[in-house]
Image: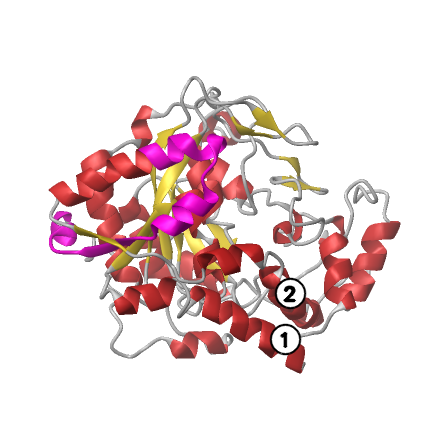
Amino acid sequence: MNNTAGSYALVGAKAPADSTVAKKLREAGAIILGKTNPSEWGNFRISLNSSNGWSAYGGQTYGPFYPHQDPSGSSSGSAVATSLGLATITLGGETCGSIIDPASYNNVVGMKPTVGFTSRHLVIPISEHMDTIGPLTKTVKDSAYVLQGIAGFDIHDNYTSAIPEEVDMDFVGACKLSALQGARLGVPRNVIRLMSDEITRSMVKAFDDSLEVLRAAGAVIVESDFPAAREFLDDSMIGAKIMGADFVVNIENYLQQLVYNPHNIKNLVDLRRWTQDSSLEGYPSKPTELWDFALQNWNNTEAEFWQAYQQGLYYDGEGGLLGTIKRHNLDAVLLPSHFSWNFAAVAGAPIVSVPIGAMQSDQPIVSDADGLVSSAPNIPFGFSFLGAKFNDAKIIGLAYAFEQRTLVRAKVKPYIIPRTELWDIMGT
């Protein structure tokens, strides 16, 4: 199958082998049905406000809960396919929100593993420091089964060598109803206040209501603000700087591994030129702003990168998620899923998002310049458990125990339902 990142630039290109995660799935007995449509180049081409679910090669993916629904991204097609039952499980890649946000907006469970828990070998990259591969499924336990199959050391990805020898990798065994008993769960109220508005009020109300479910299950809720939350949110380009510096180097390394490269694209300069010259790629109405930004700055071998990276680690570390977990002796931090992913991205920390409801009938309808509707009645949202690095089994257990006490997913119905079965296409 083509590995294209949604771009015609790589149609027909051939990698030397399956990615490690695909290889592991096959070895575990999974049947790989096909590819889904991502936001092109993992949403790292157009701008920070690019068209979720759009790629030149795949077209526009919509969420199934409201006409022209923004599916979020960049694992847009993966989330929609799982939500509609087109596949039992799908995989996505997350750099900064690309599993958790689509999972939230499409009423499925999303699991962002710790960076280094799953191999990125022969997966089209954005950032070696932030990329991770994880499942989108209908249940937490399904995600646990998938992670059980794909996690682990890979000689081709040296970030996997950071997996501690003593780490708990029994993700399925972690799925226990008793997991919440005595758990210390932090709520950074300052993050919620800073990010809340009229559009997110349904999310925040459902989040607050869900805290009572956790308390009833024996969890201890700890008010635990992130000290650097405002500073981080004000420093809006820090993630783009890190991703851009990595992308310049990482995409060149990926392209060099191809055994067939139909357009002889060797690096980001070539890729930008080809994209801007091709009538198939929607340029200039679909620009290359993030690539322009990356090429104007430095790459990840330069001193400026390490300054930016250390600042990002502070925001997610001592000034944010990891420092808060340590200071308050927490098992996890809780946030509405739409608020969560930025605070774990640079640190590479894990997140599980579980469905908790949908926007109400009086929700304001909001659409962007491309007509994608991001706010409307019946659009789902999720509840996230954020953990310390390599504490994935812990947050899977917490998410499972919460999910089994709420079971909200079945109550939120899509407005469109597939009526074609596999046997209608493949025959009997």
Please tell me which of labels 2 and 1 falls first in the chain.
Answer: 2
- Residue at left 72%, top 51%? 11
Check whether the beta carbons of the residues at disc 2 and disc 1 lie within 8 A of each other.
yes
Residue 182 located within the stretch drawn in magenta:
yes
Query: Does residue 352 appear to the left or right of 300 in the view shown?
Result: left
Frontmost residue, 276 versus 30: 276
Image spot of residue 228 (x, y percent): 45, 62
Q: Specify the quadrant that holds the C terminus.
A: top left
327 with respect to 158 (left or right):
left
- Helix, strand or loop under label 2: helix
Amino acid type at image mark 2: Lys
Region in magenta: 177-205
* Vertical position of residue 14 compared to residue 11: above or below: below
**Residue at which label 1 appears:** 305
Q: Position of residue 6 (x, y in %)?
A: 67, 47
Whole-percent x and y of residue 365?
A: 55, 22
Q: Which residue is mark 2?
A: 241
Crowd tier of the residue under label 1, counting other residues whose Cα lies within 10 Å: few below 14, some 14–19, many 20 or above: many
Q: Rounded to the nearest whole Å, what is the CA distance between mark 2 and mark 1?
A: 8 Å
Q: Tell me if I can see residue 423 in this picture.
A: yes
